[in-house]
């Protein structure tokens, strides 16, 4: 992630909390007070968000010192310190909630992604990817967290790849017509992916020259049939209704990619606390 991207997200998040100052901190804490605080994992997790933690406090007070004790992607146990910050007590307290909100979100996504990766049987080359079902404004952080957890990213935005979905098919007049139009318009470097929800649609998409076919909400038995029907003519992506329990069976069925919106839209926040050393 670019620092400029992180900084823009951090600035908006801090503005939500500090637009009117911090009346509690400013009234209770002496201006010159100094503290040391540690972000600590309350439960086992995959740590993610070290640079974001640092940038939050840098925005508030450039004199704060941040120590990144654990690298992003590391599995950590409950009670393990992740990152530390020292300097102005006021500045640390003002940034605490924003730093935790963002890193708890990122670590939660990374942890869930890692659990999906762990469910892929050995010997299977199936990729686990996210989708565009991200929190508005936080896509860059959440997609980084997916990568940190060992997953891959799907298309970043609507302009980065062709993905013909059910409503495109209806509006274009059919699968064949949509693929033909996309092939004529898109750059030669761009693959054409088409969503299907039946084996009959899969046949049409393959005959029309789709490079990737998204098997939408298909049972594992249908996915197995789709793999046999495709015979390597296109990459196959299973999506829709993907749960952790289905990862192994879908990977064994032979799909190339399993994409899950749950990695970002349903990941529970990791439990991280900021503990101050005694004065």
Image (cartoon, grey):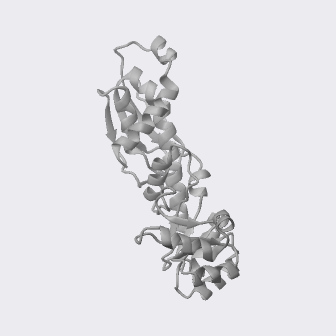
Nearest the viewer among 196 and 220 is 196
- Please report the residue visible at 55 percent of the width from the left and 59 percent of the height from the top: 131
Position in image of residue 144 (x %, y %): 44, 53
Up the image or down, 252 lies above or below 262; here it is below
Nearest the viewer among 260 and 84 is 260
Nearest the viewer among 183 and 198 is 183
- Please report the residue visible at 61 percent of the width from the left and 74 percent of the height from the top: 177
In-image side of 87 versus 45 (left or right): left
Position in image of residue 91 (x %, y %): 39, 23
Up the image or down, 190 lies above or below 155; here it is below
Nearest the viewer among 238 and 243 is 238
- Quadrant where the C terminus sits is top left
Up the image or down, 258 lies above or below 272; here it is below
Position in image of residue 205 (x %, y %): 60, 79
Is any part of residue 213 visible from this angle?
A: no
The count of marks equals 0
Position in image of residue 37 (x %, y %): 40, 31
Up the image or down, 123 lies above or below 44; here it is below
- Please report the residue visible at 49 percent of the width from the left and 33 percent of the height from the top: 13
Is any part of residue 16 visible from this angle?
A: yes
- Quarter of the figure with residue 61: top left
């Amino acid at each position: 992630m670019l620092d400029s991207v992180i900084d823009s997200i951090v600035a908006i998040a801090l503005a939500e909390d500090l637009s009117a100052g911090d009346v509690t901190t400013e009234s209770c804490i002496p201006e010159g007070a100094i503290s040391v605080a540690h972000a600590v994992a309350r439960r086992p997790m995959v740590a993610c968000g070290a640079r974001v933690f640092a940038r939050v406090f840098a925005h508030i007070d450039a004199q704060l010192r941040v120590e990144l004790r654990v690298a992003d992607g590391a599995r950590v146990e409950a009670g393990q310190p992740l990152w530390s910050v020292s300097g102005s007590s006021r500045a640390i307290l003002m940034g605490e909630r924003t730093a935790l909100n963002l890193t708890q979100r990122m670590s939660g996504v990374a942890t869930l992604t890692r659990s999906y990766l762990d469910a892929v049987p050995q010997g299977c080359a199936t990729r686990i990817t996210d989708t565009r079902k991200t929190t508005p404004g936080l896509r860059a952080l959440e997609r980084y967290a997916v990568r940190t957890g060992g997953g891959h990213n799907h298309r970043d935005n609507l302009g980065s790849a062709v993905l013909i979905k059910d409503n495109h098919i209806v509006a274009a007049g059919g699968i064949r017509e949509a693929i033909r139009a996309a092939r004529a318009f898109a750059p030669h470097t761009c693959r054409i992916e088409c969503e299907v929800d039946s084996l009959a649609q899969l046949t049409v998409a393959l005959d029309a020259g789709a490079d990737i076919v998204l098997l939408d909400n298909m049972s594992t038995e249908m996915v197995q049939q789709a793999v046999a029907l495709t015979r390597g003519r296109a990459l196959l992506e299973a999506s829709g209704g993907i749960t952790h329990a289905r990862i192994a069976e879908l990977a064994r069925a032979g799909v190339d990619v399993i994409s899950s919106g749950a990695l970002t839209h349903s990941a529970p926040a990791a439990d991280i606390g900021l503990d101050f050393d005694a004065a």
